[in-house]
Image (cartoon, rainbow, N blue to C red):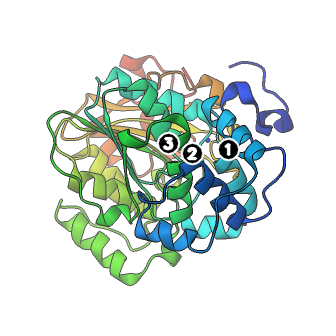
Amino acid sequence: MTGAKKKPAAARRAPAMSKGHSQAPRRLLRDERELVALCLALVGSRNSLSQAEQALANGVRPLAEPELVKRARGYIKQGLDPLGGAFLRLRAPAVRRNLGAVYTPDPIIRSMLNWSADQGTPARVVDPGAGSGRYLLAAAKRFPQAELVAVELDPLAALMLRANLAALGLTSRVRILVEDFRLAELPAIEGRTLYLGNPPYVRHHDIGDDWKQWFAQSAAAFGVRASKLAGLHIHFFLRVLQLAKPGDVGAFITSSEWLDVNYGATLRRLLAHQLGGVAVHVLDASAMPFEGAATTGAITCFKVGEQSDGLRVRSVPTLEALNGLSKGVVVPWDRARSAPRWSPSSAQSARFLRATSSWENCAGSIAAR
């Protein structure tokens, strides 16, 4: 979902086992039912499945192809995502878009984890839209003592995550909540919680009026006006603020359009105040920040309840240029709060950034630094 010389598009998108991309088993699964069967073979006992997963698996037997199951398990142990790769192939893009199911390439996950680790070791890591578990599996290695919580509404995605955990011997470390993150409850803990992931991107047309009302009332509780045009990913930022305590941190990747549109003002205000915005790294669409979707992405880093000197902003042309999310131009908050747009490519943003050049020596540009 990160310079060096740019590779041809086909080469950048091809699965590469050494880079952690998805790799499907040699015999392609025919449909989602076979994907469920493969997951069941990897999971073993069904006792741990949620009610929604049980309903999905009803009438499906574990895949009786030992070699294919063994191969899938081997890919998972190599750090690949064969189940997620099969899911992206089998489920039609239009259906996935309606659910906001877009998966993240490994370089983005790695850079977000690098930034998160620089903030200190978390006691808990929460992925609010876990999918097949790419973020949590990486976090499990990076933070071996942390409690891991996956929230995922789609029972098939939750089952894929469970299968990945079983293959890696990590089942006991992760609590999986098969529900809407806006309804999820997290117990208070000692220590910092890291909120990490790729919240589902669902447009306002597909969000019910009851949830739009929830969004408006929840935002009002923080003194912020909310637009009914906000997408689901904006709802997730607000839910984090409801659940988090001062000192918690987060890094989310989303579509970048909230930087400039009117509905994004809600999130911009939250980042400028209670949510504690630290940085926004905008990925060019040509870098393919989201698998299978040519969309500009924005990695947003925040520290709840804290106020940095300013918002670090930059444009990132390639995945390779991401590094640890430490670079960029720092825009003082008095200027960021008054700016109608935050995108580094917009003319108005460029004008307000030029005002920082005297002390930031950025010459009016926020190109990757």
Tell me the element at label 3: helix
Label 2 belongs to which residue? 297
Binning the other alpha carbons within 10 Å of mark 3 as few (below 14), some (14 to 19) or many (20 upward) gives: many
Q: Quadrant of the N terminus?
A: top right
Q: In the rendered structure, which amino acid carries the disc numbered 2?
A: Gly
Up-down relation of residue 135 to residue 309 (above or below): below
Up-down relation of residue 82 to residue 233 (above or below): above
Side of 46 relative to 337 (left or right): right
Q: Nearer the viewer, residue 5 or 158?
A: 158
Q: Which quadrant of the structure image shows residue 207?
A: bottom left
Where in the figure is residue 365, as x and y percent of width and height?
Answer: 54, 28
Q: Earlier in the sequence, mark 3 or mark 1?
A: 3
Residue 24 visible here:
no
Instruction: Compute the Cα span from label 2 to label 1.
Output: 7 Å
Are the residues at dot 2 and dot 1 in contact (C-beta closer than 8 Å)? yes
Q: In the rendered structure, which amino acid carries the disc numbered 3?
A: Leu
Label 1 belongs to which residue? 285
Q: In the rendered structure, which amino acid carries the disc numbered 1?
A: Ala
**Which residue is at a point 54% across and 39% down the rendered structure image?**
282
Side of 31 relative to 268 (left or right): right
Label 3 belongs to which residue? 165
**Which residue is at a point 78% across and 20% down the rendered structure image?**
5
**Which residue is at a point 28% across and 74% down the rendered structure image?**
214
Where in the figure is residue 201, as x and y percent of width and height?
Answer: 52, 60
**Which residue is at a point 56% across and 34% down the rendered structure image?**
108
Up-down relation of residue 224 to residue 71 (above or below): below
Where in the figure is residue 202, as x and y percent of width and height?
Answer: 52, 66
Up-down relation of residue 173 to residue 60 (above or below): above
Tell me the element at label 2: strand
Q: Quadrant of the C terminus?
A: top right
Q: Earlier in the sequence, mark 2 or mark 1?
A: 1
Instruction: Compute the Cα span from label 3 to label 1.
Output: 31 Å
